[in-house]
Image (cartoon, rainbow, N blue to C red):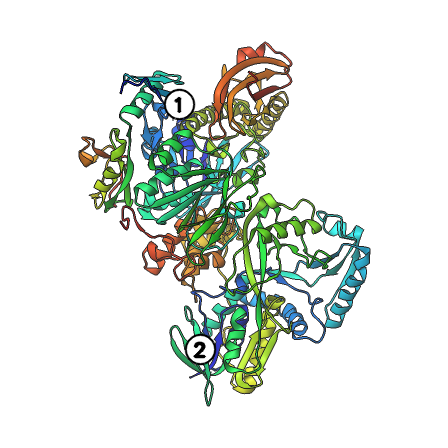
Amino acid sequence: MSEKKENKTELTCIRCPIGCLLTVTERSDGTLDVEGNTCKRGEEYGRKELSNPTRIVTSTVRVKNGSHFMVSVKTKEDVPKGKMKDCIEALKGIEVEAPIHIGEVILSNVAGTGVDIVATKSVERR
Amino acid sequence: MYDVIIIGAGVSGCSVARELSAYNRKVAVLERASDICEGTSKANSGIVHAGYDAKPGTMKAAMNLRGNRLMESLSRQLDFPFRQNGSLVLCFSEKDRDKLEELLEKGTKNGVEGLRIVEKEELRELEPNLSGQAVAALYAPTGGIVCPFGLTIALAENASVNGVEFHLDTEVKEIKKLEEGYRIETSKGVFSSRTVVNAAGVYADTFHNMVSGRKLHIVPRKGEYCLCDKTVGNYVSHTIFQLPTEYGKGVLVTPTVHGNLMLGPTAVDIEEKEGVNTTGQGLGDVLERSGLSIQKVPAGKVITSFAGLRAHEDGGDFVIGESEDAKGFIDVAGIESPGLTSAPAIGEYVAELIQKIIPAEKKEDFIEKRNGIPSMAEADKEKRQELISQNPAYANVICRCELVTEGEIMDAIHRPLGATSLDGVKRRTRAGMGRCQSGFCSTKAVEILARELGKDIGDITKAGGKSVFLTGRNKESDE
Amino acid sequence: MDRKAEIVIVGGGPAGLAAAAAAYKRGIDAEKIWIIERDKELGGILNQCIHNGFGLHTFKEELTGPEYAARYISQVKEIGISCLLQTIVVDIQADADGKKRVVAMNRKDGLFEIETEAVILAMGCRERPRGALNIPGYRPAGIYSAGTAQHYVNIEGRMPGKEVVILGSGDIGLIMARRMTLEGAKVKLVAELMPYSGGLKRNIVQCLDDFGIPLKLSHTVIDIDGKERVKGVTVAQVDENRKPIPGTEEYISCDTLLLSCGLIPENELSTGMGVTLNPVTSGPVVNESLETNIPGVFACGNVLHVHDLVDYVSEEAENAGCHAADYVRRMEKGEGGKAAKEAKEAGKEAGKGKEEGGMAIPVKCAGGVRYTVPSLVRPSCMQEEQIIRFRVGNVYKNAVLTVQFDDTVVMKINKRVMAPGEMEQIKLKKSKLEEFPGLGEITVVVEESRL
């Protein structure tokens, strides 16, 4: 495939609230060129979205004997975008005992991503 | 064997039940919905008509007048909101003045007190926000406004306290005339009764026709309404009617007894007896036609809209009385406007009919007074403190728009014929009736219902049946 | 029970928390600052906003709602600010002597009053209900505001439905589209009445695009079907006057309709005490000190105007907290130690405030600018840099944002894109204003570039 074709993708940068409109050009040699960004993070985002898109996943898990029924959780770091549903699936049926502290690991290495699920709220014991 | 079975726990049925509850008889009310006041009685104008509208000599005229006169003392006895704010019928053209005179004459014949025609200047003084298109109006000082839920629930509670059985979620399927009395098949089993009071609203013809050869035919006549925020609740102080014009029957603009402004209704005959949906056309009509009465219709202040069905019988009058070919079967049918006003009179009238069929002694221990749910919103400082000291839950505000507390909701659930659904709580306490329309308090009210009824929140409904709020737990997809 | 405070903050959400901490740092004793919160815990709506995306401005990291709230809650707790939970303010009155009386109640203390110098309004906002949208149809169960659905899913762990249509593309609706999808529901469509989304772009990307959920602009729900529970909705395209176009109707079966059609500041208490509202924001009219027309009554956060990001709420609330603290100090000095003169002095001070208010320069909107907060600026009371926040009423590509002092353009910024969903801001310099003595008005203008 030596055809000199350039693939242009329009993206909205979500690294910060400005939401720059990025144009990512995929050159025939496989390199990526990002335009429209107003900061370096935008360029990073544009490259990453095309090569390896990732997301933070947030959800809740059930709490036993807590002041709340549920505790909110998140993946401690980004996970591959395609793994979002798997992360949620892995939380199915999990119930944690109160007290829970913010930042506490609820599930390690969720869905084989190498990323932990941590609590994003403290829940006291009832 | 019951002495009396009343079909339908709307305002007519409940009024009959309450009147009958003063006597030593075995009485039951069968209601297909999960709560009282779930049909026509919950979706109407809430107007206590003065009585100039009905044709002299009709049942409507008689019941309206009597009902209007009973309402005030009843409201004090049973503690429901009622206010005599007076009403005005606007006349928009000199050509129509004779119609106004006709109305005055009819009203005078019917015995309505204090009726008079007011001219433009006085009209403007009475109601500065009128559109200015009215040339004169008929003023009826005895017109009033009432809370339709408050009235119906008060009647039902009092009837219940005095021994009337209420069978909710009980739908009547079939009625058969027996040697003596009637056999009533329902979704909850068979009832038999010496007499039947058919107060089934838009279904009254169906039940009547099961036992009588002299057929009734009821058309559901849909009326759509818009309810506006309390910030425009005093836009008018009287109930403002319109004389029918070449553009059709008018709509009314009225303050409600709780301080909102209400516009409507439309009047469209429909086929379906359950067609309580609003339509774009109908709501548009309400707003447009209100503009004939008032300047600057506050369309941006609409907080909710709803539709109700009036049970219009082909004959045009109330059909109240024992069926000629079905002895002991008493119809309370075709109760459209002024049905709410007439309810106290209908109760009284039907009770007298039954007294002739099954004479009974008056109960010595009849409790004629009923106390409503104390309202924190209306209470003064001392009363509020008193309520909180009785139950600290009165300090926990659930509905912030209408200032309704946990204490009031608990009362609504635990009193006789208490609320079992969110709509039930709403109609008894006004929680969720404010400008956010339960956006904030519904989750809390559902939680209190579940707790007080010993149920899971997943089993709490909006209005019984399959009207659940929740469909399952997180991460429980069907796939 | 009667209590005395210097600052009473109504609402313990992000605005109230940040205002409290800032007032303390500005020199008010912790025990003289009261936060009154309706809920059983502090944090407000952030407690149910379990998604990430909070705090990028404030903390330079991406937090979830509860984490963002936790940072402020621990601050307030460490300082020792008095917090009354599960307590509702019923009424606020401003007395002639400048003091305010806050009437509140709770289970423990019943009905009580707090006397205070300053009040900070931080009650937040509520969602626009179905009734206000006047959507025709039946009224079954299954119609929720997006925030109610968020409460059920995130706080109760319950699903309000399985097949969902969302009307309105406000941020909470977009967030809930993703939340419900991840938790097992099928979100069939997001319909938006306007030709643009009311939400943040990143939410459209991450909440809809990521999951292939269609967003139909210029579409609305024109009928709701189902007598007990929602069975379906009819969606139609609308014309430029937002009227449904006949022939474009489409019936979508679903058991749930979520509404995300805008937020309305909750100002019953404010109007009850005589605070003037701006009809565009539905929030109080405030000056550069975030002070309402009643001296000593301040407003911040979503009760003032609906924000897009909580970071700006915190920033604004900190300002309100500082200004309230300064007000309290001024009142103290005004007292001059003589209790008998207190009322008179305070009255004078309040009167002076009004005179100053008279010299205030109005900040006006032109072009695409819908409103500004503040809408009045008193140069003498300004900090060196004054933030003016605003929103535009349409999508502007290659926009030019200008600030005019009377007829002189003093600032001109080119913007690639401006959208109604995103709050904008400019910074006015006090030194610049001082170059224009006798300035009549400041105008903020947004126009499409003519290039």
At mark 1, the secondary structure is: helix
Amino acid type indicated by mark 1? Lys
Q: Nearer the viewer, mark 2 or mark 1?
A: 2
Q: Is residue C415 left or right of residue B61?
A: left
Disc 1 is attached to a residue of which chain? C
Task: Identify the residue under disc 1.
Answer: C25
Residue lying at 48% horizontally and 23% vertically, measured from the top left = C417
Can residue C48 be seen from the camera position used here? no
Distance between mark 2 and mark 1 Cα atoms: 76 Å
Quarter of the image for residue C53 reads top left
Disc 2 is attached to a residue of which chain? B
At mark 2, the secondary structure is: strand
Both on one chain, marks 2 and 1?
Answer: no
Can residue C398 be seen from the camera position used here? yes
Q: What is the x, y in percent for residue B168?
A: 42, 69
Q: Which mark is residue C273?
A: none
The crowd level at tag 2 (other Cα within 10 Å; few <14, some 14-19, many 20+) is some
Residue lying at 33% horizontally and 42% vertically, measured from the top left = C181
Q: What is the x, y in percent for residue A105?
A: 20, 34
Image quarter hosting the N terminus of chain B: bottom left
Quick check: A80 above or below B71?
above
Q: What is the x, y in percent for residue B400?
A: 47, 46
Task: Identify the residue under disc 2.
Answer: B174
Q: Is residue C281 left or right of residue C309?
A: right
Quick check: A49 above or below B319?
above
Quick check: B443 above or below C59?
below
